[in-house]
């Protein structure tokens, strides 16, 4: 419900618990629908490497549709707008799952455009839905409560996602043993995730908010943009977000390909390592939130971005023979790179941007660190993978191609380290 005045303590507390409840159910849903399952589906449907790289980058390209969320928020509020787009994104997920039907009917020409379009809409609706999520968190919390809510909600999301990944790994193992590795099991997983996603929207509909967000969303975007370009702190924050999002995107793409096509790990095995990454997300969500509160969000951003560089270095020294402890460490650290662009940057955003400008800045920032980074990561990773194809022979070890990939990404990530740490240190209040 939307209120004209400030929320009471009870309304804030109830809204915060509904937000955490949404994070719990959404963690289950996203595990069944997110990057890992989409990649597994693409690999099973024998799509080329560049297409798989494009699928991973769609999570950022979808931010092109983010302005739709601002327009909807101006009419029905932030929470109900996100709930509406959450239903739409799960319908799009079912469209992606329908590619299995065409594959079974041997109509392969439609599969690639169907998956790319469906995944784009899936992530586009997510972007439109969360356009006001950071201002919404600021609206239902005090400055002392924000770090705790972001830490708890992210921890709940990734912890339930980790549990669900463990369940999915056993489901896929059972599928391989008793159902002859039926692709229809993936269809069932995606359908279940879509159902949970629709259920998560119910928690969003119960979140209270003030009239301020809707009023800010109704203002023309261009009026605030002129001032934004002249604000050095906001521009530095934008550069930092672009660098951290790019580091996360380009390393996740390479990590999954290294695991699946370099080491030849099975679907259930890949999900177990994705489980490690989710555990890393949950652990680093709490640790980085505490680190940001005890030191500063800037320091936490720098630490989390360093994980992208460390992940790259570890893949470069990875042995030709599969080494489980090393891969566990890599995917655990990969979780830290994801938190760098999620909770830590959100804390810095609320610290850096005045409340009156948070709506407009949220749209602009997300367009850049979302759409721009997505297109950049998709193009660069696809080019690098194509170049790596020409550097290996059929007799080369399978991991050599992906080792070259990380060798080429290392200088880019080292340059991005400067951009990630350029944000200003704010005095603690």
Image (spheres, rainbow, N blue to C red):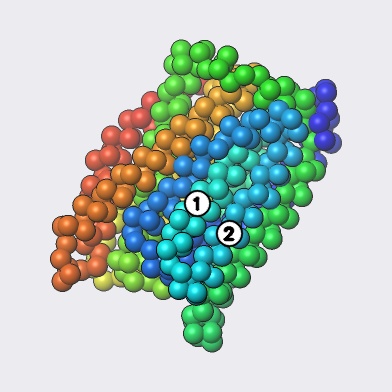
Callouts 2 and 1 close, C-beta under 8 Å = yes
Q: Quadrant of the C terminus?
A: top right
Residue 134 horizontal side relative to residue 204, left or right:
left
Image coordinates of residue 214 in percent, x first then y, are: 72, 26
Q: Is residue 292 above or below residue 152?
A: above
Task: Please name the residue shown 25% across and 64% down the image.
Answer: 399
Q: Quadrant of the N terminus?
A: top right
Label for residue 65?
Answer: none
Circle 1: is it few (<14), some (14-19), or many (20+) Cα within 10 Å?
Answer: some
Task: Please name the residue shown 77% across and 50% down the image.
Answer: 202
Rendering quarter of residue 343:
top right
Task: Please name the residue shown 81% across and 31% down the image.
Answer: 2
> Which residue is tagged 1?
117
Q: Please tell me which of labels 2 and 1 falls first in the chain.
A: 2
Q: Is residue 304 visible?
A: no
Image coordinates of residue 21 in percent, x first then y, are: 72, 50
Task: Please name the residue shown 41% across and 73% down the image.
Answer: 266
Image coordinates of residue 167 in percent, x first then y, are: 59, 70
> Which residue is tagged 2?
95
Rendering quarter of residue 79:
top right
Image coordinates of residue 192 in percent, x first then y, are: 65, 65
Residue 282 horizontal side relative to residue 86, left or right:
left
Q: Could you say which is closer to the camera, residue 266 or residue 313?
A: 266
Q: Could you say which is closer to the camera, residue 204 or residue 221?
A: 221
Circle 2: is it few (<14), some (14-19), or many (20+) Cα within 10 Å?
Answer: some
């Amino acid at each position: 419900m939307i209120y004209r005045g400030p929320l009471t303590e009870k309304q804030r507390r109830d809204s915060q618990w509904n937000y955490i409840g949404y994070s719990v159910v959404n963690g289950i849903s996203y595990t069944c629908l997110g990057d890992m399952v989409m990649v597994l589906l693409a690999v099973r449907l024998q799509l080329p490497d560049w297409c798989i790289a494009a699928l991973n980058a769609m999570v950022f390209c979808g931010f092109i549709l983010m302005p739709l969320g601002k327009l909807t928020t101006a009419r029905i509020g932030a929470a109900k707008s996100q709930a509406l787009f959450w239903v739409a994104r799960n319908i799009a997920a079912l469209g992606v799952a329908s590619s299995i039907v065409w594959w079974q009917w041997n109509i392969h020409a439609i599969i690639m455009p169907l998956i790319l379009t469906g995944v784009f809409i899936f992530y586009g609706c997510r972007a439109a839905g969360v356009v006001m999520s950071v201002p919404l968190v600021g609206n239902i919390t005090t400055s002392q409560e924000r770090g705790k809510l972001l830490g708890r909600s992210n921890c709940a999301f990734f912890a339930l996602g980790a549990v669900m990944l463990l369940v999915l790994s056993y489901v896929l193992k059972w599928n391989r043993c008793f159902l002859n590795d039926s692709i229809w099991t993936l269809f069932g997983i995606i359908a279940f995730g879509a159902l949970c996603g629709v259920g998560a929207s119910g928690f969003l509909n119960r979140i209270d908010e003030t009239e301020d967000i809707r009023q800010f969303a109704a203002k023309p975007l261009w009026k605030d943009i002129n001032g934004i370009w002249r604000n050095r702190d906001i521009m530095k924050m934008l550069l930092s977000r672009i660098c951290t999002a790019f580091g996360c995107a380009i390393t996740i793409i390479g990590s999954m390909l290294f695991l699946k096509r370099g080491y030849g790990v099975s679907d259930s095995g890949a999900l177990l390592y994705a489980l490690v990454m989710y555990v890393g997300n949950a652990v680093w969500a709490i640790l980085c939130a505490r680190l940001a509160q005890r030191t500063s969000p800037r320091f936490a951003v720098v630490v989390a971005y360093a994980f992208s560089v460390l992940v790259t270095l570890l893949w470069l020294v990875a042995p030709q023979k599969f080494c489980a402890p090393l891969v566990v460490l890599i995917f655990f650290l990969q979780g830290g790179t994801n938190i760098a662009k999620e909770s830590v940057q959100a804390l810095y955003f609320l610290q850096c941007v005045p409340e009156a400008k948070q709506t407009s800045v949220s749209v602009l920032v997300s367009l850049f660190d979302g759409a721009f980074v997505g297109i950049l990561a998709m193009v660069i990773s696809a080019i690098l993978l194509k170049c790596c194809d020409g550097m290996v022979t059929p007799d080369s070890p399978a991991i050599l191609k992906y080792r070259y990939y990380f060798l080429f990404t290392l200088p880019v990530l080292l340059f991005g380290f400067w951009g990630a740490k350029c944000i200003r240190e704010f005095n603690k209040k």
